[in-house]
Image (cartoon, rainbow, N blue to C red):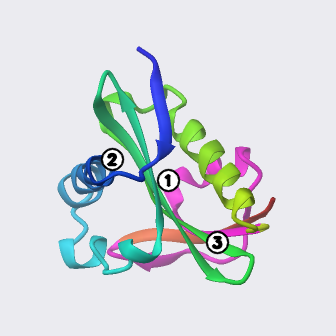
Amino acid sequence: MTVDVRVAESDPDREAALSVRREVFIEEQGVPEDIEMDGRDDEAVHLVATAGGEPVGAARLREVDPGVGKVERVAVVDERRGEGIGRDLMDTLEATAADRGIDRLIMHAQTHVEAFYRRLGYETTSDVFEEAGIDHVEMEKTL
């Protein structure tokens, strides 16, 4: 089934992206809702991936300094992992960032997906630290 990845500009698309985040981070990984829903969604660009009209992936991008974007909340629903949806989300996110004049991306990546981001050209720039009870590393990439 074809997956469509796009900027979530409509309310239904944003709700679809939020539903993926709820499923993956809150329900599956046990991240407290007040940490996941951090009040910064209004300052972010959201992406959603859908297949057959159903949401299967999400990500968000915030410009944290001039020309510097922070990749956040990248998620793919469990039953669709390993199909390239995460790569498609990141490709679209990076193109969106570049279109907005962002030339450097940073992120706090969960350590279990560090190798995935490394394959996409991100470099690890920190030791392991805990965020929301999950081990993370800082990573960055110049576009």
Disc 1 and disc 3 in contact, CB within 8 angstroms: no
Question: Can you say whether 85 is above or below 91 in the image?
Answer: above
* N-term-proximal mark, 1 vs 3: 3
| Front-most of residues 46 and 77 | 46
Residue named by callout 1: 112
Residue 47 lies left or right of residue 20; in this view the side is right
Q: Give the residue displayed 38% in from the left and 79% down from the top.
A: 40
Rate crowding at label 3 as few (under 14), some (14 to 19) or many (20 or more) other CA atoms within 10 Å.
many
The number of discs equals: 3
Q: Give the residue displayed 29% in from the left and 27% down from the top.
A: 53
Residue named by callout 3: 69
Residue type pointed to by label 2: Asp
Please say whether residue 75 is visible from this viewpoint. no
Q: In the image, residue 113 lies at what x, y percent?
A: 53, 51
| Front-most of residues 7 and 82 | 7
Residue type pointed to by label 1: His
Q: Which residues are magenta?
A: 104-133
